[in-house]
Image (cartoon, rainbow, N blue to C red):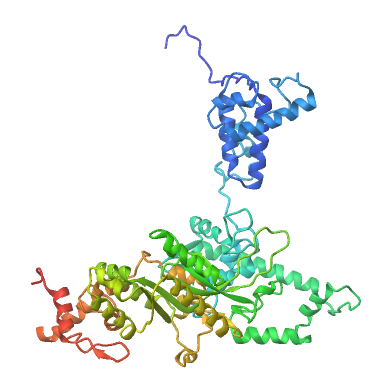
Amino acid sequence: MPASEPVRLGRKRVLPACPNPLFLRWLTELRDEAREKGLKTQYTYQKALSSLNKYPLPLRNAKEAKILQNFGDGICKILDEKLQRYHQENGADAQIQSVSSAAPPAGRADNNSVAPSRKNSAGDGGKDRAPDGKKKRREYVPQKRSGGHAVLLTLYRQSQIPDSKGFMFKLELQAEAQPLCDKSFTVPDLGSKYTAWTSVSTLIQKNLLIKTHNPARYSLTEEGLALAERLAAAERQTTEEEEEEEEGPGVVDLTGSDDGEGEEDRTHPTGSAAGQQSSDTDASCSSEKPQSSQTTSRHQGGGCLLPGTYEIILCVDFIETTGGSNHRKQELVKELQRNRVNFDIRKLNVGDFLWVAREKVTPVPGQLRVPAGRELVLDYIIERKRMDDLCGSIIDGRFREQKFRLKRCGLHRPVYLVEEHGTAASHLSLPEATLQQAIVNTQVVDGFFVKRVQDVRESAAYLTIMTRYLNKVYQNRTLSCRSRELEGDVCGAEEERGVPSCSLISFAEFNHGAVKNKCQTVREVFARQLMQISGLSGDKAAAILEHYSTPHSLMAAYERCASEAEKEKLLASVRYGKLKRNVGPALSRTVYQLYCTQGPLS
C-alpha cells in the first residue's frame, strides 16, 4: 500500500431509510403476530421483509410489490386491505412513503431475523451468556399438561415399578399418558392436524426419548430420565400444596344449585347406587389404573363399552367400491343402502369386510366435528372372491398368502365369500375341479367358513343378514378392549363353546398390525421362505418355527446331527395342525437340501 493513501477505518456505511415504511411496519406486525401464535407463516413474512428491505424504490400499492421475491397474492391482498383502511382514516392524499415513527429502520436486525438481535441479547446484563461470552443453550422443558410432559412422566413412573420391562408400546403409552395431558393423543383439535403424540418426535430429537424395535418400543435416555425425575418431583410438590389447601371437614352445601350434585358425587362416590354400579363395571371390565376425577364420562368404563353405548357397523374395503368393474362394485353399495345396512367405506389392510363396535359419542357444544369414538373389531372378517379372482390368486400365489395373513390378523372367525361358482369356471385358465378343490381345502384344511353365492346381490344379502345377526348377538354384551401387542392372541372358554368373544382389539391396532409391507422380523421372513417350498403350508411352517425360530437355529441343529440320514429326518417328526400330523420325511429332506446343499439343487 502506498504511504500517500489515507488509512480507511472499518466503519459501516449508514444504510438509507426504507422508502416503504408503512409496508415494512405492517409486515413486521404480521410476522410478530404469527410468531406469538406459533404459526409457520412467520417465516413467509420474514422472507417478504427481507425482499422489501432490499428494494430501493417507493411502492404506490401492494400490487406493485408482486415483482419482489416472496410476495404472493395473499400477502399483497392483506397489504392492500391495510392500505385502504389507512387512506380511509388519513385521507386519500395521505403520504405512504413518509417515514413513520413506528416503522423500524431498514437496517435493524428486527427486520432481518425472526430471532432477537445480538445487541438486545447482550443488553440483558449477560444473563443468557456463559462466562466465556458464548450464549447459553436453553434446556428444553415441556409445558405442564402437554404431550411431551405426559409422556416423560408416564415413562418415568413405569421405570420406577419393580421388575418393569423398561419400555412401553405406543398404544400402552398413549393410554397411560392421556389422563396427564389436556390434548388427545389420537384425535387432533378442530382446525389442526397435530395431536399430543406429535411432541414425541421433539423428545426424540432432544435426545430425551429413544425409539427401538418394531412394533415400536419407547424408553427414556439418561437425559430424559433426569428431566422426568425433576418433573415428577415438581408434580408431587404441586399435589402436596393442593392437598394442604383442600384440607378441611369436607362439608357439602345441600342448599346449592343442581350444579353441585356432581361435586357431591365426587366427594362421596359410594353414596349412590349409580356410583357402585360404575365401580363394579370398572372392576369387571378392565384392570387398568383408576383415572383422575376429571376424566370425562366416556372413559368411566375404562377400556369397556357398556351395552347401549355402541353400535355395530359394517366396514367395507374401499377397493370393493372403486376400480375394475365400477358398475358391479357400485351395485354392492346400492344393495347395502337399499337394505338399510349401517356401513362405512375405509381402507382395510387385510380382508374385504369386517364389523366394528363403534362408541356412540354425543356432540360437544361449540365444536364443528363430533369427537371420534372408540372402535373395537368384532371377531368376524370376510374375504370376497369371484371365480376369476380366485383363479388369478392361485396362479400368482396370492391365495396362500392371503389365507396366511387372515390367520395371523388376530380375528378368529374368517369367512371366504365365493361368487359365481359353477358354469363361470369353465372359461377360466384353471380347471373347475382345481378351483373346487381349493375352496374345499380352504374350509377343511384351513378351517375357514366358506359361503357360496351366485352374484353381488346375494353377497349384499349375506352381509345384511350377518350385520343383523351380530347386532342381536352383541345387543346386551359389555365389550372390553385388549392389546394384542401386550397379550397376544388369546382364545377364551366362551369362544371354545362357540360364544363370540367380548375381549376385542381396537381397529387402529388391528389395521396397523395387518399392514402388508411393514418391516418384518427374521422369524416372519423365515416363515415366508419356508412357505415357498411346494407342499409346505402355513401350519407346517408355524410348527417348524416353534422348534427353530430362525435359519441360524435350524443350521445349528443340522450341525449337531451325527449323520446325513439324521439331518434329512430332523423335521420329519415335527407335528402340525389340529390333528397333530407329522411333517414327514419327504418335506424334511427337501428343507435340508434347500439350506445345506452347497451348489445348485438338482
Residue lying at the far right of the rendered structure: 255
Image position of 211 (left or right of 437): right
Image position of 221 (left or right of 294): left
Residue 114 location (% of width, % of height): 59, 38
Can residue 583 be seen by looking at this rendering?
Answer: yes
Image position of 414 (left or right of 433): right
Q: Is residue 579 above or below residue 457?
A: below
The quarter of the picture where residue 338 lies is bottom right
Which quadrant would the N terminus be assigned to in this image?
Answer: top left
Image position of 375 (left or right of 543): right
Residue 588 location (% of width, % of height): 17, 82
Can residue 287 be seen by looking at this rendering?
Answer: no
Residue lying at the far top of the rendered structure: 4
**Foreground pick, 559 / 595:** 595
Q: Is residue 490 above or below residue 15?
A: below
Residue lying at the far front of the rendered structure: 423
Q: Is residue 197 above or below residue 5?
A: below
Q: Is residue 495 above or below residue 51?
A: below
**Foreground pick, 28 / 309:** 309
Residue 282 location (% of width, % of height): 64, 83
**Foreground pick, 192 / 220:** 192
Which quadrant would the C terminus be assigned to in this image?
Answer: bottom left
Residue 83 location (% of width, % of height): 70, 28
The quarter of the picture where residue 566 lies is bottom left
Q: How many marks?
A: 0
